[in-house]
Image (spheres, grey):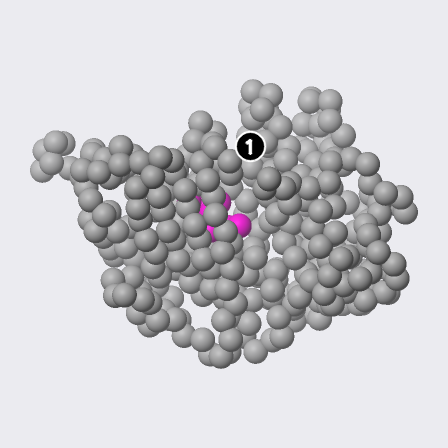
């Protein structure tokens, strides 16, 4: 085959819708829970629990990612990772993803190949696969992901179950994505691991089910920032959450990036989003191994830090 005949050197407009879908799905391996994958009018996925956890999220070029910062492979991984975190936040295990994409007809097939590889790589990492979706033309790259999950016989962990006397805990450090974003904005490449954390979050998909098994009373993922997402738990549970600044786990590279950019790293840890670790409440003796206690739950309303209202950055909002 000459280079001129190789589809990977052309555009999606040259290739066409069905050939593009074929490239994205051919030869892919599905877990045993997928009875029928892409190719028919709909997929069939086992639901042994008899309930299916469902979530959806959208990523828009220029709003949720920048292609001068992120590769197409990065974008694919991020799209799956953030949806998988929502499944984990219910205490469930991911079973499949539906991916819909809009892009210009001039988009290189090689870029879509890289995007597809990223989608599949992250879906595989969390123990699932891509079972269907759609493609259409548009003026920029847009991804819409629907994620499916299985509760494995457990009750879902809601945002509304926190009780006075519980403790507040995180499944991992926060502030890495926000620090990476700030470094990109400043044009600094000093901390490549933080830049990578902004491009692709990598939370552990086992943290949600582990929290559910440990008896988490409420839970959500940290997509918009600890302060903002703690506010969701507080409002839904009608309790007060007080965060201890000294108990926040701030990685050393985040601290050093803060020194370089003149930013208090606690602002990134509490107000920065897109780390997609989990925030949950537990009875004091139930916090799972690997989680870190960062605060307390009491009667009242709202979120405080060391007993007072937080005056720093609070949360990402879409509008």
Quadrant into which the N terminus falls:
top left
Q: Quadrant of residue 275?
A: top right
Picture coordinates of residue 66 (x, y %)? 47, 32
> Badge 1: few (under 14), some or many (20 or more) residues near its Cα, within 10 Å?
many
| Furthest residue in direction front, as rendered | 319
| Furthest residue in direction left, as rendered | 1
Magenta residues span 76-82
Residue 207 is covered by the magenta coloring: no
Q: Residue at image x 73%, y 22%?
A: 262
Picture coordinates of residue 16 (x, y %)? 20, 44
In the depicted structure, whether residue 48 falls above or below residue 89 = below
Q: Residue at image x 64%, y 45%?
A: 224
Q: Quadrant of residue 181?
A: top right
Task: Tell whether 11 sits left or right of 240.
Answer: left
Q: Residue at image x 62%, y 75%?
A: 155
Closest to the observer: 140 or 93? 140
Name the secondary structure under disc 1. Answer: helix
| Furthest residue in direction right, as rendered | 307
Pointer 1: what residue?
195
């Amino acid at each position: 085959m000459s280079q001129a005949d190789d589809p990977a050197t052309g555009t999606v407009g040259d290739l066409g819708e069905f050939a593009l879908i074929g490239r994205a799905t051919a030869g892919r391996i599905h877990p045993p829970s997928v009875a029928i994958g892409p190719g028919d009018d709909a997929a069939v996925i086992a639901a042994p629990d008899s309930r299916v956890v469902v979530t959806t999220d959208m990523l828009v070029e220029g709003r949720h990612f920048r292609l001068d910062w992120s590769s197409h492979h990065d974008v694919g991984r991020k799209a799956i990772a953030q949806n998988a975190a929502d499944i984990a936040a219910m205490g469930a295990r991911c079973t499949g993803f539906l991916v819909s994409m809009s892009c210009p007809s001039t988009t290189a097939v090689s870029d879509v190949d890289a995007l597809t590889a990223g989608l599949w790589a992250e879906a595989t990492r969390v123990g699932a696969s891509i079972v269907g979706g759609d493609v259409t033309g548009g003026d920029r790259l847009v991804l819409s992901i629907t994620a499916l999950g299985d509760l494995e016989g457990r009750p879902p962990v809601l945002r509304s179950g926190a009780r006075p006397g519980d403790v507040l805990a995180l499944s991992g450090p926060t502030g890495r994505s926000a620090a990476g974003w700030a470094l990109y904005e400043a044009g600094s490449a000093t901390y490549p691991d933080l830049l990578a954390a902004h491009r692709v979050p990598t939370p552990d998909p086992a943290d949600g089910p582990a929290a559910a098994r440990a008896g988490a009373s409420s839970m959500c993922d940290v997509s918009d920032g600890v302060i903002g997402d703690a506010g969701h738990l507080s409002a839904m549970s009608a309790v007060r959450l007080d965060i201890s600044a000294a108990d926040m786990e701030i990685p050393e590279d985040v601290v050093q990036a803060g020194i370089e950019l003149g930013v208090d790293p606690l602002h990134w840890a509490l107000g920065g989003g897109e780390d997609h670790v989990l925030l949950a409440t537990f009875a004091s003796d139930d916090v799972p191994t690997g989680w870190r206690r960062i605060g307390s739950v009491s009667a009242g309303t709202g979120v405080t830090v060391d007993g007072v209202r937080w005056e720093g950055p609070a949360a990402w909002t879409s509008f």
